[in-house]
Amino acid sequence: MTRVEVAIVGAGFAGIGVASALRRSGRDDFVLLERAASVGGTWRDNTYPGIACDVPSHLYGFAAHPNPTWSGTYARGAEIHAYLEHVVDAEGLRDRLRLHAPMRWAGWDAEHGVWRIGTGSGREGGDGDDVVVADVLVLTCGRLTEPTIPRIAGLETFPGPLFHSARWDHSADLAGARVGVVGTGASAVQIVPELARTAAHVTLFQRTPAWIVPRGGDAYSDADRARFVADPASLEALRADLYAEGEARFASRSGDSAAAAAAEAVALAHLERQVADPALRAALTPDYAFGCKRVLLSDDFYPAVASDAVSLVTSALAGVEASALVASDGTRHEVDALVLATGFASTRQPYAELVTGEDGVTLAEHWSEGMTAFASTVVAGFPNLFVLNGPNASLGHSSSVLMIEEQAGYVTRVLDGRAGRVLRVDPAAERTYTDEIARAAASTRWMTGGCRNWYVDERSGRLALLWPGTVDAFRERLARADGSEFLPAPALEGSPA
């Protein structure tokens, strides 16, 4: 058994961010649990061809750890993974990191006022169970960790290589192969151009086209990187400019009519420049409002789809019959390999089923009508629990790392004032915050834009994933949290476990 003040589950950006914040606030009694063999989260797991961030690299990092050596405007996946490894070392977190330690279950022990987290191979309380006991549990498990595999008749019978984009099979030789790709979201727009360069042919299944704007960006020269190293102020100024640009982008993503119209015009002009065939252009034109779904960045997706190397199927994949992919329009397409770029379980977080709070209620049950939390971070019925990257903590216009930093700051402020007591969220505070979110989201394109997106929970029809405001607004909202979100409690509760 391991006994700590704080147990953090997940060593991606959020886990590393909150661990760093704890250490800088003077807390060393914590453990960082990671199920895999290294840190990095989604940037460790996703290794598909062409993977890169679509947020400018100098904004996609921790403020305390600027990286003057990014290769270009948009960092590649391997670079980001290496950056996170660097931050772990720079913050001295290796001695608090436990790899190959998945959270198999977590339960609130009311008698002792602690969380018990099972990370071993055994069942709860059984042989082989390795238990971590913590006063505080911080879930930083990520929202893009569990791939969604669509239910497609006969999929399991496909004879060739078959894998999700987040579990890329590098042993599969796709050069000269006929490759099917299902999906046209953020991963697919990066994968398809890469496959088109080496595969015999790519067949792309599109249910819904995406709004795509020019990516732009350049590689940083050696001189650029040397300047960033020699003049940290210039790097800080660049980050400030990128932050301001991101905040300004919120208007076009959320529903400001003029801003959205201008951004839509940019996207349509981009499509017209790159796709000459009117029929193909029409097939690639969304019929829903700009910003309703995630807006994508690419300069090479449209040229790839318009080339002879790619065939666009404007129907969902309905069935698999041996090596033939059958679209919902009845057309058949012979392929040698199949890539599922079909997204993740975002609004229904798999880890929620593993966490049991007071009265035996699981987090999944509490979230049965959609994820909710006060300050997007603390949840009623789950004492001394914090969730990062969970309910309404994502962004549709800027860097998610900015939100992580704000949440990590909230965690440390709350813990500084805890004074040993058990923190129980007032259910009324959570409801009030949820209602605030609903009112702010009601007029946004995410709710009114005429599309199905992965930001809205279909069970409740609520915006469950995104924060419907700017980063500045989120920072201000968390700053107003004064502790009244927690129920009154004695100064000390429970006893040492």
Image: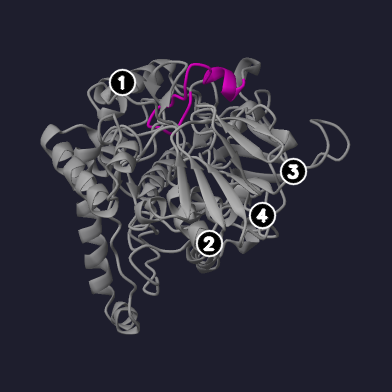
| Disc 1 element | helix
Q: In front: mark 3 or mark 2?
A: 3
Residue 384 vs residue 394, the one in the foreground? 394
Query: For the residues marked 1 and 2, what is the alpha-carbon distance in whole angstroms?
Result: 35 Å
Q: Which residues are magenta?
A: 362-379
Query: For the residues marked 3 and 2, what is the alpha-carbon distance in whole angstroms?
Result: 33 Å
Location of residue 132 in the rendering, given as x and y in whole percent from the top left corner:
71, 42
The type of residue carrying mark 2 is His
Q: Residue at x 39, y 49 (%)?
A: 405
The type of residue carrying mark 4 is Asp
N-terminal label among 3 and 2: 2
The quarter of the displayed image where residue 287 is located: top left
Is 375 colored magenta in this rendering?
yes
The type of residue carrying mark 1 is Ala
Q: In front: mark 4 or mark 2?
A: 4
Q: Residue at x 20, y 39 (%)?
A: 252
Query: For the residues marked 1 and 3, what is the alpha-carbon distance in whole angstroms?
Result: 46 Å
Q: Which residue, given by chain and number where applicable, does mark 4 sit on?
A: 169
N-terminal label among 3 and 4: 3
Q: In front: mark 1 or mark 3?
A: 3
Is 380 colored magenta in this rendering?
no
Q: Which residue, given by chain and number where applicable, does mark 2 sit on?
A: 81
Query: For the residues marked 3 and 4, what is the alpha-carbon distance in whole angstroms?
Result: 15 Å
Which of the numbered marks, if any, corresponds to residue 159?
Answer: 3
Q: Which residue, given by chain and number where applicable, does mark 1 sit on?
A: 438
N-terminal label among 4 and 2: 2
